[in-house]
Image (tube, coloured by chain):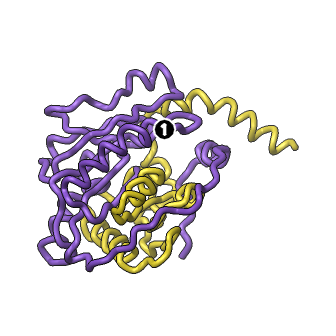
């Protein structure tokens, strides 16, 4: 089967995507996997707008409401053993109730622990990473690229991460 | 998200992106992609549907382990359990996002012109 990217999009939102010009930057980076999954240490990155409500600032939606062409680029670092009740979601572009019901819809902390237990993967790192995916219109990911991604990559390196599963929302 | 996959991959960490928008992933150029025909916001499967979530993650891990060239996209056979209308309604926020509210009138006009043209 071939996945239709537009199957669940109303026509206006499909137009929004189709109007955004973008050409791939070549070459596409590549890191070959050099050991079996059962020896790899995994982390997770989502753009679902998750944050730890007990000690982190929410994603800035007030500014986005005032400036619709801007989206909060900042990073939230989430402990992999977080209790789902400690996580909140701020995202104006999707219905967030499903993730509120079950964090594994986007950040599969429980599923990854199960995969460690059954030996499919080696281990999970101590932290996962969350952004809010809307980066303005036209999209501008320069703050991610220059500031937040390098910080995340330092953390991934410090925790000895081999592989990352990314889940946009 | 595709730009983050690229940037992480470039530092020597292998990445796998699961996305409902392979159209967008291919426009930007992502190392490894598992495409799922799911509504936005529920990338790995519906809430409480641990069976579906696990099948999608295992497919993603298989792409990670077997892809042998950059730009590999594999399409998941996984079916979304709701009908299309319900799913389209279900993923959208109660209020349109600020940018959609701002741009909608322009887009509607553009679509009208296109139909006329």
Asked whether B34 or B42 is in front, the reply is B34
Q: Provide the residue designation for mark 1.
A: A142
Chain assigned yellow = B
The chain letter for the residue carrying disc 1 is A
Q: From where the camera sits, is residue B45 visible?
A: no
Q: Position of residue B20 (x, y in %)?
A: 48, 59
Secondary structure under tag 1 reads helix
In the rendered image, residue B16, in percent from the top left (x then y), is placed at 39, 65
Q: Report the number of numbered marks.
A: 1
Q: Quadrant of the N terminus of chain A?
A: bottom right
Residue A104 at x, y percent in the picture: 25, 57
Viewer-nearest residue: A168 or A75? A75
Q: Is residue B30 above or below residue A75?
A: below
- The quadrant holding residue B64 is bottom left
Residue at x 42% of width, y 56% of height: B5
Residue at coordinates 47% horizontally, 47% vertically from top-left?
B89
Using the rendered view, name the quadrant where residue B28 is placed: bottom right
Q: Which chain gets the purple colouring?
A: A
Q: Is residue A19 visible?
A: yes
Check disc 1: other Cα within 10 Å, few if <14, some if 14-19, many if 20+.
Answer: few
């Amino acid at each position: 089967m071939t996945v239709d990217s537009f199957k669940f999009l109303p026509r206006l939102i499909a137009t929004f995507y189709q109007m955004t010009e973008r050409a791939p930057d070549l070459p596409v980076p590549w890191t070959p996997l050099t050991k079996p999954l059962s020896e790899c240490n995994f982390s997770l990155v989502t753009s679902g707008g998750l944050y730890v409500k007990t000690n982190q600032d929410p994603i800035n939606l007030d500014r986005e409401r005032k400036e619709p062409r801007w989206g909060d680029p900042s990073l939230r670092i989430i402990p992999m053993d977080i209790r789902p009740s400690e996580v909140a979601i701020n995202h104006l572009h999707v219905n967030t109730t499903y993730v509120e019901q079950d964090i594994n819809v986007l950040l599969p902390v429980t599923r990854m622990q199960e995969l460690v237990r059954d030996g499919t993967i080696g281990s999970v790192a101590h932290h996962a990473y969350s952004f809010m995916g809307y980066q303005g219109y036209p999209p501008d990911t320069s703050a991610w690229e220059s500031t937040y991604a390098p910080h995340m990559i330092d953390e991934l390196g410090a925790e000895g991460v081999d592989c990352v599963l990314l889940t946009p929302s | 998200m595709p730009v983050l996959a690229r940037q992480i991959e470039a530092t020597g960490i292998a990445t796998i992106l699961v996305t409902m928008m392979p159209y967008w992933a291919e426009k930007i150029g992502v190392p490894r992609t598992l495409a799922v025909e799911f509504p936005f916001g529920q990338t790995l499967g519906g809430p409480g549907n641990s069976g579906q979530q696990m099948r999608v993650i295992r497919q993603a891990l298989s792409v990670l382990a077997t892809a042998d060239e950059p730009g590999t996209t594999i399409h998941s056979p996984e079916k979304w359990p709701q009908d299309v209308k319900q799913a389209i309604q279900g993923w959208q926020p109660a209020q349109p996002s600020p940018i959609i509210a701002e741009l909608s009138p322009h887009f509607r006009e553009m679509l009208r012109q296109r139909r006329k043209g």
